[in-house]
Image (spheres, rainbow, N blue to C red):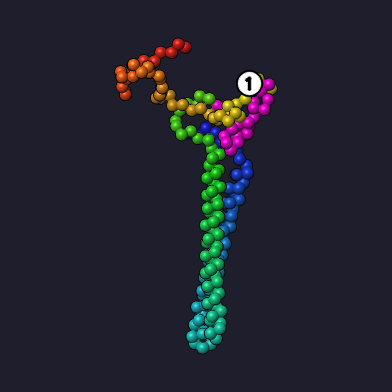
Amino acid sequence: PLLGIISVPELDSSVAQQAALVRQSRDTVSTAQSTLRLQQATYARVHTLVLHGILSNQEDDATLAAVESAQSNLQAMENAEKGAEAALAREQSLADFEQVRSPIDGTITARNVEVGNLVSASGAAQGPAAVSPVLTGGPPTGGAQGGELFDVVDLGSLEVFVSVPEQDALFVQTGQPVDLTFSE
């Protein structure tokens, strides 16, 4: 489940810029394809005229070279498009980290970050409570001290670790029902 969204304007603009570069690369590939088709059509006409002796072999070679050049240009543009798509995928995968998600379904038991807090790349949050606890009357957030942003627990099952005295360890078995008593 989605717990929060971290706003990273620089990353969002980088994703938009990379998406624009991908669109531009696709347009360039389309232009290169059109150029190649034109050069191939021109070569077909010139080659026919060369075979009938109307044009020289030099013109045939020149138009063939133009076709090969257009093919190379198309290949370069396709490679540039793949590079732009890879850069976009990288930026998008980084942008996916803007969404703070819980790996489990559960209940939020602690929120150690507030709207407007600065969350660093290490996950630490810094905000008004971290800067001046006197003004807010509360302690710094756990995130400001490098703690978690959220605590999420699955209340459907509970794991309890208890110390068992060595002389009683022989009587403990997996799956055995247990009664827990707390002084609170």
Q: Name the one closer to the observer, 129 or 7.
A: 129
Q: How many marks?
A: 1
Label 1 residue SS = loop
Residue at the image point whose x is 59% and y is 53% from the top? 20
Q: Is residue 55 above or below residue 107?
A: below
Q: Is residue 89 above or below residue 74?
A: above
Residue at the image point whose x is 54% and y is 76% from the top? 65
- Mark 1: amino acid: Gly
Residue picked out by circle 1: 138
Residue 64, x across and y down, in percent = 52, 77
Residue at the image point whose x is 44% and y is 26% from the top? 154
Residue 57, x across and y down, in percent = 53, 85
Q: Name the one closer to the observer, 6 or 129.
A: 129
Q: Is residue 127 magenta?
A: yes
* Disc 1: CA contacts within 10 A as few (<14), some (14-19) or many (>=20): few
Q: Is residue 55 above or below residue 32?
A: below
Residue 61, x across and y down, in percent = 54, 80
Residue at the image point whose x is 69% and y is 22% from the top? 135
- State the residue lying farthest toward the top: 183
Does residue 63 appear left or right of residue 131 in this picture? left
Residue 149, x across and y down, in percent = 55, 30
- State the residue lying farthest toward the front: 167
Asked whether residue 26 is in view, the answer is no
The image quadrant that residue 125 belongs to is top right
Q: Name the one closer to the observer, 104 or 133.
A: 133
Does residue 146 appear left or right of residue 178 in this picture? right
Q: Where does the magenta region start and end?
A: 111-134
